[in-house]
Image (cartoon, rainbow, N blue to C red):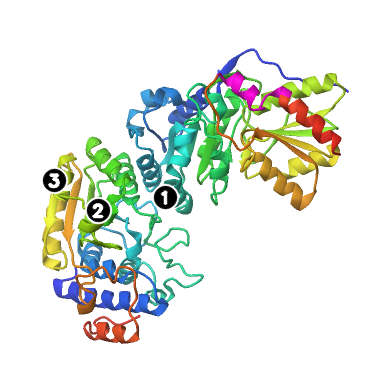
Amino acid sequence: MPNTQHLKDLTIQVRRDILRMVHKVNSGHPGGSLGCAEFFVTLYNKIMDRHDSFDMDGIGEDLFFLSNGHISPVYYSVLARAGYFPVEELNTFRLINSRLQGHPTTHEGLPGIRIASGSLGQGMSVAIGAAQAKKLNSDNHLIYSLHGDGELQEGQNWEAIMYASAKKVDNLISTVDLNGKQIDGATDDVLAMGDLKAKFEAFDWIVVEIKEGNDIDAILKGMAEAKSKTGQGKPVCVLLETIMGNGVDFMMHTHAWHGKAPNDEQLASALNQNPETLGDY
Amino acid sequence: MLMKTYTYTEKKDTRSGFGAGLAELGRTNPNVVALCADLVGSLKMDKFIEENPERFFQVGIAEANMMGIAAGLTIGGKIPFTGTFANFSTGRVYDQIRQSIAYSGKNVKICASHAGLTLGEDGATHQILEDIGLMKMLPGMVVINPCDYNQTKAATLAIAEHNGPVYLRFGRPSVPIFTPEDQKFEIGKAVKMTEGTDVTIVATGHLVWEALEASKALHEQGVSAEVINIHTIKPLDEEAILASIAKTGCIVTAEEHNYLGGLGESVSRVLALKHPTPQEFVATNDTFGESGTPAQLMEKYGLNSEAIVEKVKAVIARK
C-alpha cells in the first residue's frame, strides 16, 4: 500500500496532468478537478478494494461512479496513473478520435469508466443500481460515488436520496464535493441549498464530514469512518469540504477557473508551484 | 384470388402479453430484474413480483431515478425491465435514457404501456404520440411496437436475448388476438400477413388489426392489399418493404403516432433512397389527443380501418 508521502507526490503529479491537459486544448474544467485531486488519489490508491484490470461488471471489487463528469481531467489522470490505460493517452484529452472525451463515457471503451456523465444529477441513481446489483450477486464490495454540490440542485438526486434510505442501500458511500461554487458564482448566491448535513440526515442517511477535504490524512480518516458505517441499513454520505483550484494560488477560492484553461504564462506559474514528482506524461 | 383472412376468438390487452412474458422470464432467466414507478397493476407485473420479490424494485413516482437505477443494475450483469406508461417512459426521462442508457450502451429494456390514443379517457397528458420518434432518434436504441397479446409476449421474451437498449411499446385496451401463441419473434423482421398486388399496407401496433380489417373491405371492392406487420420500427426491415412495393407500386403506413417522427417517416426515407413510391400516412396529424373511448378517438383521429381504406384509395389514385 502506498504511504502518505507517495500519495502527496502523486497528487502533485495529478495536478500537473490536469493543468497540462486543459492548457493543451484550451478547454476543460481545472477548478473542480484540482479541488478533488487528493480525494481521487486517496480513493483509488488507498480506499477502494479494486482489481488492476478493468471489467465492466466489476464483480468482487469496489466500484466508483463520477456524477459531475466535467471534472474528467482529474478522473482521467488518476485512472491512467492507476494503470487502467497508458498515461501518454492523457495527451489526447478532448481531441478528435480520442477515448478521453470532454466528459467521461463508456462509448469509446476507455477502461475504468462504467457510465457516461456530464448531464448532471444522474450518477447517484446509477450508483444505487450498481449497489443493488452487488446485493443480488451476494458481492460484499462497496459502491463509491462523487457529486458536485451545485449538482444537488438537480431534482433527480433527491429522488435517489429518498430511495437509497427507503430501500436500505447500505453498501453505498456517496461523497459531495462541497466547494461552495458553481459556474455562475457561489452556490449560496445561485441557489442556496441550506444545511446539507441536516437534509441528508432528514432523508435518513448517515453523514460523515471531512472538513479538510484537501488533506490526505483527513480524507483517509473520514473515508475509513464512512466505510465503517456501511452495512448498517443506511446509505452513507460524505460531505467533503474542498477548495476549488487547490494547489495553484491564483486558481484557489474562486469559481473563475470552473471551466477555463490557463494561458502559457499561467500554466508556467502553476507548474512552478507543483514541481514534477513522478514524471510528466 | 383468395385472400388469407384472420379471425379471433378472444380479445386481450397487449400489456397483459408483456406481463405474461415478464413472468416467464422470471422463471427462465435469473438475470432479469424489473423496476416499476408505481404502476404495477397497470403494467401487469404482479406475477413476476409475486414469484421474484427479490428481483423487483419499486421506485415510487420517480421515473428519472428508475432509469438511472436500471442503468446501474446492468453493471453486475442484470437485465433490467422498467415499467411505466409510455409518456413517463420516454418524454419525461429523455435525457436520463439518452446519457445513462443509450450513450452508455446499457442493456436496459424500457417497457411502456398505455401508448397512444387508445389510453382513452385520461386524455392528452397521458396519450403520448411522439414516443416512437423520440426513441428511434437515439443511436443504438431498438424500437418495437407489437400488435396483439401473443406478439407482445413473444417480443418480451425476445428482447431479453438482445444485448442493448430496447424500447418496447404496448397499449391499454383489449384488442383481438390474431397471431399465433407459439410464434418466434425476430427483432427487425417484418411479418407478411396477407399477399396482395395493388397496394402495400405497412402497419404497426394496434393498427395491424385495423389494416387486416381494411384489407377485407378492400378485397370486397376488388382491391388486393398486401398487409405487412412491422413490429420493429428500428431496425426497419427495408427488404420486406422494398420487395412488396416492387409488386404493388404504392404504400400506406399505419401507426398510432404522430406522422412526424413515426413509422411512416422511417418508411419514407427508405423509399426516397431506394425506390421513390407514392405513400399515404395513417397517423395523427401533428396534434395532441383528448379524452374519449379508444374507439371514438381512433375514429376521430383517423386511425381505424375505414381511414386506412380511404388512404389506400388515395394512394392507388396516385400510381
Residue B297 among magenta residues: yes
Q: Nearer the viewer, mark 1 or mark 3?
A: 3
Residue A50 among magenta residues: no
Instruction: Give the CA separation, mark 3 to mark 2.
Output: 17 Å
Q: Residue B207's x, y, as percent?
A: 66, 28
Q: Residue A189's x, y, as percent?
A: 22, 58
Q: Can you tell which quarter of the image residue B246 is in?
A: top right
Instruction: Give the CA separation, mark 1 to mark 3.
Output: 29 Å
Pointers 1 and 3 within a single chain: no
Please say if the residues under marks 1 and 2 sit with CB atoms less than 8 Å apart: no
Instruction: Give the CA separation, mark 1 to mark 2.
Output: 26 Å
Q: For mark 2, does the 10 Å Cα neighbourhood hold few (<14), some (14 to 19), or many (20 or more) residues?
A: few
| Magenta: main secondary structure | helix
Q: Which mark is residue A194?
A: none
Element at label 1: helix
Nearest the camera: B227 or A185?
Answer: A185
Q: Which residues are magenta?
A: B293-306
